[in-house]
């Protein structure tokens, strides 16, 4: 039987040294007893080599880094089995090099359990340390008394140093104490609760907050205790309130239900009356482009508004000679509230500048004012509006046509052509020429820019784009 | 009017804030106070500093700047017609409380909301002033969540997003018609427009290939909240609305808040509260859509309600038994994620282990929270459910004996 002595409870280097030599010497796990040197401890001088095995140094061997990381955490657990469990894993790694990846192996699973316990203890330490303000010769310092579930104080102290860099603090625990002087961390032996300040003026405010933020109508004490186990309660200033809050919760909820409803305050009733008298009158057809812009947001003529952000009205001078009508806003247009600002808008802008058409002098709008789409995975995918939706929205487009009175209307794509012409109008057959519209304006049909984005064949795409630019030029000439 | 003590104000204005479910402090950029003048850090994971007996985490100082409000939303305790006691913090009081609580490690930061006083812009400006003072005067690097008032001007919304880690705008109710009825001053289009503007800002901040790093714009994104049970909306309608919001605005979270009775409630509201389990099932279904590859239509139809007795994944599996059993040693990740009782982590571990050995039932048991529920749906090296998967009484066999929440 081999006895391996470690200097203190979290002596990872000592364990590593001993384990390396034990394995090199061929000592099986069941033949090793791991102990902590009673006289030792973190702050005693660890002078002699704690391991009393023959020091025949064997060739160094390597283990997966994941194992070393795991071991570094498991060592911090309070369970007595940790050293032997880790050595057993190290031993088995000789014959099973992939062991550490097999999370379902009983030893690996156990090590993961311990690791989870340690991580949780560190996390809870970050959560449940409560500082109290203290004064010493150097001024203000914050001091906490805390009892961690495992020996995580040294590993967690850097977190507090990063968070409270410009604040002097000490965290006192039974195992070890951490101190930060705004420049460096220092550690001293474990302390006693009496060493920490007894109170803090702000705790009364914190308790007030805790009691007020609690909703008595939804009591879930098991959920609370799962995340805030009772072992931590004695060092949490707010925990003393818990029994009373629970006891009174039901009565408070009943009282709310019994008492309700109450008479509204008289001030509010008066204001509401005033509002209903002065509210704007909903007129009929829009009489200005501002009416259109405000109206499409609240249009309920078809159900497309439900899943869209907003109605997107046209944009441009009220007396534009040239009007562009697209299909409908896309994802970006729906968010921004402006037509042709997304990928299709970029193609449109490029073609306009190649055709020599200044967009700022034209009126740009859509046949349908709300974005029709379906959600696939995480994205909103464009859907073509139905003729019913196009018809419903024509009310707005007709309003815009009547108000702007353009000389020429360019219909971008089949939906726009359907809306403006009032009947299905194939693009390829009708493009490149002026069409007479009912309201004295001339019409030009052409491709929709997003159609050009989707043409798979590169040559066809080039040809389509060239035709598109030609159509824009034609329209600009007609409008001049 | 008598002057209220700070403690009394804190009691009133935190009591008024508790109906907002969000308390997350996660998902922001990593930063700490090293090299700064002040305090504060966010390191990715949120930290819950306490839990109240309602089971909710307390991570942030969640308060209203004021609970005076000119709006009259029936479901809200702070509506103008309510007789609830009123209070108002000064900007400095909020700043001092935040820093004082933060230094004592009570909180991760501040979640500031407000009733609407004078105008949306005036109120939003005050809220932005709190965040700016914390960031610029005190170099505070903790977490800030600002509630955005949708009617406020885009300039103020943008400023809010520059100082805050997260901004949120509550959609409030699953059906727009109910919003019009219960919250007459709120406008769903205004709410959606504000969300759209935030998404465009967040997207622009993340655009690849930009030379100069833009100032962080709400690095923890945006979230929203829906009240469940205050109108007649079905679970299917609620989830369809959530799905549409996730797609349109890339929300980090939709919070479902079971309508709970409030003191001094309005006559327009139902007095019965929905069971808390309903909220829980909605969150489960939400998770299935976001992390498990389920489409909303697979989980529930638009007019249906979720089964309260069993979780939505189990309900789906019972309806789709033809897809089972799944072989734990060969099935791809997507199919394993659909097995009731297997979470994202467990599936990850299974895929890892399976590279080195064939899994037996005992292995699965050590990788999951329990194997009994899984047995009818899984094939392992030493287990096959045989006719169990298709038994008529399977539901009774796998249904939990009692609800875990009530």
Image (cartoon, rainbow, N blue to C red):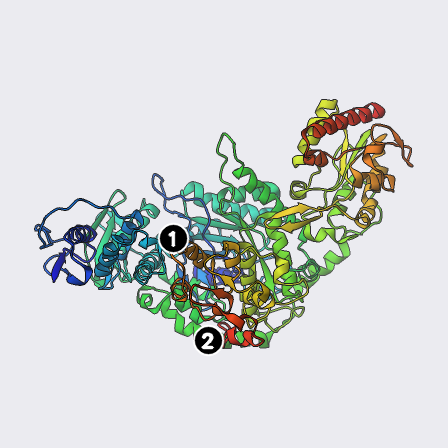
Q: Quadrant of residue A321?
A: top right
Q: Is residue B171 left or right of residue A327?
A: left
Do we see residue A174 in this rendering? no
Give percent across and percent down for residue B287: 53, 58
Q: Which quadrant is the N terminus of chain A positioned in? A: bottom left
Mark 1 residue element = helix
2 and 1 marks in contact (CB < 8 Å): no
Q: Which mark is residue B102?
A: 1
Rendered location of residue A320, percent (x, y)? 80, 30
Q: Residue at x 81, y 30 (%)?
A: A322
Residue at image mark 2: A248
Locate the C terminus of chain A by quadrant.
Answer: top right
Viewer-nearest residue: B43 or A376: A376
Circle 2 residues within 10 Å: few <14, some 14–19, many ≥20: few
Kindly report the distance in space between the C-alpha atoms of the residues bearing marks 2 and 1. Answer: 29 Å
Query: Residue B124 has which mark?
Result: none
Q: Chain of mark 2?
A: A
Tell me the element at label 2.
helix
Count of numbered circles in the view: 2
For label 1, the crowd category at 10 Å Cα-Cα, with few meaning under 14, some 14 to 19 and many 20 or more, is many
Residues at marks 2 and 1 on the same chain: no
| Left-right relation of B166 to A338 | left
């Amino acid at each position: 039987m081999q006895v391996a002595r470690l200097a203190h409870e979290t002596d990872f280097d000592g364990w590593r040294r001993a384990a390396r030599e034990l394995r090199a010497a061929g000592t099986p796990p069941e033949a090793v007893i791991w102990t902590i040197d009673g006289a030792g401890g973190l702050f005693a001088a660890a002078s002699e080599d704690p391991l009393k095995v023959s020091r025949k140094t064997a060739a160094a061997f390597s283990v997966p880094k994941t194992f070393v990381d795991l071991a570094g955490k498991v060592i911090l657990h309070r369970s007595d089995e940790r050293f032997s469990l880790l050595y057993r894993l190290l031993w088995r790694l000789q014959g099973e090099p992939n062991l550490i990846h097999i999370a379902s192996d009983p030893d690996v699973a156990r090590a993961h359990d311990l690791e989870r316990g340690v991580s949780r203890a560190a996390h809870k330490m970050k959560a449940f340390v409560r500082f109290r303000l203290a004064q010493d010769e150097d001024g203000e310092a914050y001091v906490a008394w805390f009892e961690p579930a495992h020996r995580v104080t040294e590993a967690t102290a850097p977190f507090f140093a990063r968070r409270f860099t410009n604040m002097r603090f000490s965290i006192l625990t039974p195992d070890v104490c951490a101190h930060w002087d705004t420049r460096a961390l220092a550690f001293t032996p474990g302390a006693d609760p009496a060493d920490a300040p007894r109170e803090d003026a702000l705790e009364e405010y914190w308790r007030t907050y805790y009691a007020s933020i609690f909703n008595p109508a939804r009591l879930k004490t098991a959920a609370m205790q799962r995340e805030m186990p009772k072992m931590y309660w004695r060092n949490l200033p707010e925990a003393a309130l818990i029994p009373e809050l629970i006891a009174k919760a039901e009565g408070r909820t009943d009282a709310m239900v019994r008492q309700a409803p109450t008479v509204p305050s008289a001030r509010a009733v008066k204001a509401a009356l005033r509002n209903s008298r002065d509210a704007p009158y909903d007129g009929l057809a829009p009489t200005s482009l501002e009416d259109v812009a405000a109206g499409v947001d609240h249009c309920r003529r078809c159900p497309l508004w439900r899943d869209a952000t907003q109605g997107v009205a046209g944009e441009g001078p009220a007396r534009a000679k040239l009007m562009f009508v697209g299909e409908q806003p896309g994802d970006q247009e729906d968010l921004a509230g402006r037509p042709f600002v997304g990928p299709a808008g970029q193609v449109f802008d490029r073609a306009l500048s190649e055709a020599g058409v200044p967009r700022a002098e034209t009126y740009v709008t859509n046949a349908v004012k709300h974005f029709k789409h379906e959600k696939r995975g995480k994205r909103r995918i464009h859907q073509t509006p139905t003729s019913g939706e196009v018809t419903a929205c024509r009310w707005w487009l007709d309003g815009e046509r009547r108000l702007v009175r353009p000389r020429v209307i360019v219909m971008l794509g089949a939906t726009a052509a359907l809306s403006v012409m009032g009947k299905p109008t194939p693009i390829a057959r009708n493009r490149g020429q002026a069409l007479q519209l009912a309201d004295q304006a001339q019409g030009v049909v052409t491709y929709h820019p997003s159609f050009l984005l989707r043409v798979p064949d590169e040559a066809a795409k080039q040809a389509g784009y060239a035709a598109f630019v030609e159509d824009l030029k034609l329209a600009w000439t007609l409008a001049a | 009017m008598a002057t209220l003590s700070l403690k009394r104000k804190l009691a009133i204005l935190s009591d008024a804030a508790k109906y907002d479910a969000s308390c997350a402090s996660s998902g922001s950029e990593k930063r700490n106070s090293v090299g700064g003048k002040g305090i504060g850090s966010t390191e990715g994971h949120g930290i819950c500093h306490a839990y109240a007996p309602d089971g909710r985490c307390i991570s942030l100082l969640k308060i209203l700047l004021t609970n005076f409000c000119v709006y009259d939303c029936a479901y809200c305790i702070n509506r103008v017609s309510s007789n609830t006691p009123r209070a108002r913090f000064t900007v400095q009081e909020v700043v001092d409380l935040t820093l004082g609580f933060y230094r004592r490690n009570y909180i991760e930061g501040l979640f500031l909301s407000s009733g609407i006083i004078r105008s949306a812009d005036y109120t939003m400006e005050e809220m932005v002033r709190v965040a700016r003072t914390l960031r610029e005067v005190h170099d505070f690097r903790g977490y800030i969540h600002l509630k955005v008032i949708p009617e406020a001007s885009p300039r103020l919304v943008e400023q809010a997003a520059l100082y805050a880690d997260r901004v949120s705008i509550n959609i409030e109710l699953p059906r727009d018609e109910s919003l019009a009825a219960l919250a007459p001053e709120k406008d769903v289009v205004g709410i959606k427009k504000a969300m759209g503007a935030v998404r465009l800002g967040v997207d622009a901040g993340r655009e690849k290939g930009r030379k100069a790093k833009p100032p962080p714009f709400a690095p923890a994104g945006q979230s929203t909240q829906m009240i469940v049970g205050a109108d007649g909306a079905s679970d299917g309608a609620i989830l369809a609305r959530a799905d549409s919001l996730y797609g349109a605005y890339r929300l980090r979270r939709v919070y479902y808040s079971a309508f709970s009775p409030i003191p001094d409630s309005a006559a327009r509201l139902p007095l019965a509260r929905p069971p808390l389990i309903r909220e829980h099932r909605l969150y489960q279904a939400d998770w299935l859509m976001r992390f498990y590859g389920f489409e909303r239509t697979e989980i529930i139809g638009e007019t249906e309600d979720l089964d309260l007795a069993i979780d939505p994944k189990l309900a789906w599996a019972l309806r789709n038994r033809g897809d089972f059993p799944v072989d734990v040693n060969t099935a791809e990740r997507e199919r394993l994620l659909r097995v009731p009782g297997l979470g994202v982590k467990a599936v990850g571990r299974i895929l890892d282990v399976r590279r080195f050995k064939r899994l037996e039932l005992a292995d699965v048991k050590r990788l999951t929270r329990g194997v009994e529920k899984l047995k009818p749906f899984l094939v392992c090296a030493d287990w096959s459910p045989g006719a169990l998967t298709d038994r008529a009484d399977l539901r009774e066999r796998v249904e939990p004996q009692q609800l875990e929440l009530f």
